[in-house]
Image (cartoon, rainbow, N blue to C red):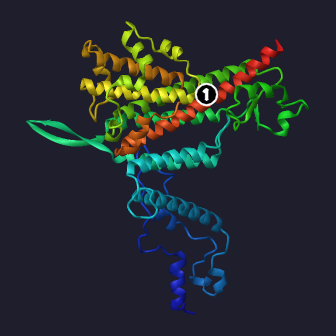
Amino acid sequence: MESSPSSDQNEVSLSGTPTSSVSSPYRRTHSDISGLSHRFDVESFYNRPSDTSAVVLSGHEEDLSEDAVEPKDNVDGDGDSDIDSAEDAELEMMRERFAKLLLGEDMSGSGKGVCTAVTVSNSITNLYATVFGQSLRLQPLSTEKKDLWKREMNCFMSICDYIVEVIPRSLGNNVEITETKLRSDILMNLPALRKLDNMLMDILDGFTENEFWYVERGSSSMNSNNGGRDSGSFRKVVVQRKDEKWWLPVPCVPAEGLSEDERKHLRHKRDCANQIHKAALAINDSTLNDMDIPDSYLTTLPKSGKASVGDVIYKQLCTAEKFYPDQLLDILKISSEHEALELADKVEASLVTWRRKTGGLTHSKSSWDMMKDMSGDAGNDKNHILAARARSLLFCLKQRYPELSQTSLDICKIQYNRDVGKAVLESYSRVLEGLAYNVVSWIDDVLYVDRTVRNRDD
């Protein structure tokens, strides 16, 4: 019996290889700095071997029924559907990101959206809130949130792969060519931020088998006194310390306190997180200093720096032979974060005013140039001295209150920034700075409860 034309077609469709090339739904960029999730080889997927249930019609197998040659259901169907669904979800995520970048977060499409730099900055901030917003204790991130963070941050970081600067290179014989390389600030800071990110994830992953635990404030277990991992004995201690942060879970320790090994482990993790916080803060401060000061901010400044800081602070800045910012902060007796932020805004405004008077303020001056302007090379000019002392006071204030919100100048710079590379560096360093500070605070909470319990027993 000869096989019919329809049989020949079935034979090709079941065992043959498609002659037309299959293109990927979208292209992805892979680099040493960033990339999306694992590479999915579409061509090998479509050229994979046929199912074992698909029998080729030839020779003595010609008389098999049509049902015998059809692939059986659910042999590899579940695996293929999982791959397809993952690809569809990632493709949809890419479409959403691409649309938001083009629309500038203005979903009406009327062209009233923000620029690309602000869109990227907001997206990274929102991603951090999504992944870490509900993480209020020392414990590893869930696999889903960790994958979400890595996948989408890789997507944002891939933008920096194409931010380059052109440099000349000599070939000899008076011949020069131009080359491109990653912009110097991105080349220096982005790998450092990725390293700090991985270190923070490792710190959180290390809190799997702990001697401490958490209970929700106001829960029944908080007031229980049934022995075991109860927290009734330590409730008053914790509430008195963190009454302003009622939404945080309460850390609890055993009645005899933590073991010495556990305390050493916590102190080591705290030191690491504190160093990460300082490094991220330095990168963020450097990136913000390199951003242009918007004209809208300059127009709001008073004519004199004295009008910004007030008579008391101005007198301390002018009259003292040697200026000690810590002593000035002690004199001011700042009682709340709101007062600290208000003082930071005033000092920063006076700093910009005095720098404008010295001619040391340009729209593209780097942080290193600013430090040189306020160094000994500037001479004994009064405005130079005032600017240098105001900057030291602002630095000391931020060190004393690390949880301080962004100043008015910082917010204005981020809002009017048009440099996408600086937007990525600023937002990435800012969220890592916040996460590192939270880790330090959570460890301090546990050590505080442990110290209080042991002192009570003594």
Q: Position of residue 247 (x, y in %)?
A: 70, 38
Pick the residue in front: 388 or 338. 338
Residue tagged 1: 440
Q: Amino acid at mark 1?
A: Val
Q: Is residue 399 left or right of residue 287?
A: right
Residue 403 in view, yes or no = no
Of all residues shown, which one is farthest toward the right?
226
Q: Position of residue 150 (x, y in %)?
A: 53, 46
Point out the image quarter for the N terminus. Answer: bottom right
Which residue is found at the position 88% from the left and 34% from the top?
Answer: 224
Task: Write down the quadrant of residue 354 in the picture.
Answer: top left
Point out the image quarter for the C terminus. Answer: top right
Q: Is residue 99 left or right of residue 149?
A: left
Q: Position of residue 316 (x, y in %)?
A: 42, 13
Residue 423 in view, yes or no = yes
- Number of marks in picture: 1
Pick the residue in front: 57 or 372. 372
Q: Is residue 388 left or right of residue 13?
A: left
